[in-house]
Image (spheres, grey):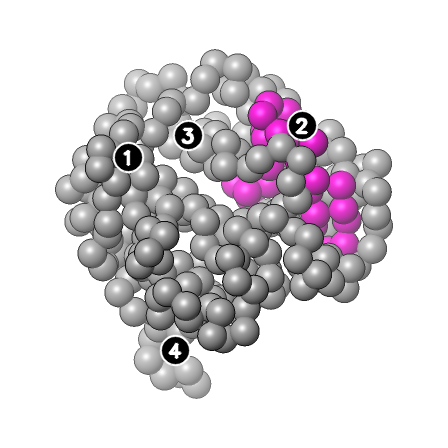
Amino acid sequence: MIAANSRYNLMELMVCVASRQLENERTAVIGTGMPLAAAMLAQKTTAPNLIILFEAGSAAPELIKLPVSVADSYTQTRALLHGSMDEIMESCQRGVVDYTFLGGAQIDRYGNLNTTMIGTDYQHPHVRLPGSGGANDLASFCWKTLVITPHDRRRFVSKLDFLTTPGYLTGPGARESAGLPPGSGPYKVISTLALMGYDPLTKQMKVESLHPGVTRQDVIENTGFEMLFADPLPVTPEPMEGELRILREEVDPERIIIGK
């Protein structure tokens, strides 16, 4: 794992890695927490013309302060649109949104997500989770789905307790057979251990780089299914000093996301 005396912490690494996945002049529906910090950092570094949309109805705002939620007034500063969820979801359905950031209690090898329940009995679950919100719609119609999550066997499971949000469903061709847009689906997973993508043929999750100090065995021991690995397997590039400065001084000076 990352050394305690490192010049950055794990949250800072994950935000920096996530921000690098967002391309300039693309559109992205962004949620609360680390995804928001990542999108804001991307706008201030590698993707100045990234168009951010919020589920509550704001589109293309200027993020001058880190919002605490997707309905925060700071999501509306100089926005091109002050609408509602209807306009945002319609944009996804029309195929004009490139990215969405999601999370979940469970994720499987095909990028399917569970945010509904833990247990085997829907009426009497061990844990009742908040549900889909807009996650099912976003993952169904945005072209690329990114996930940020802790990495352990409780989350990376061989079988979901409940399928809330579609990834590649059961594998190659399954999304298309279900009527979802061809070419859409899971894109990257940024975890506390590694950066993952998906094998283009099998649609199974694949480690693309290990975070500094993390071993292949760490990933294997904390994953409930057989994870694929890139060969050769690089180390995730560390945050650059410029990224860290902007993240700490401009994106999250109060350290709401990245910690004290």
Tag 2: Cα neighbours inside 10 Å, few (<14), some, or many (≥20)?
some
Residues shaded magenta = 33-60
Q: Position of residue 30 (x, y in %)?
A: 62, 47
> What x and y, as percent, mark residue 23?
58, 35
Which label is found at residue 125?
4
* Above or below, 217 relative to 49: below
Q: Amino acid at mark 3?
A: Leu
Q: Amino acid at mark 4?
A: Pro
Alpha-carbon span between mark 3 and mark 1: 12 Å
The residue depicted at 68 percent of the width and 53 percent of the height is 96
Image marks 2 and 3: residues in contact by CB distance under 8 Å: no
Quarter of the figure with residue 135: bottom right
- Residue of label 2: 48
Q: Secondary structure at mark 4?
A: loop
Q: CA distance from mark 2 to mark 3?
A: 20 Å
Q: Position of residue 67 (x, y in %)?
A: 67, 40
Q: Nearer the viewer, mark 3 or mark 1?
A: 1
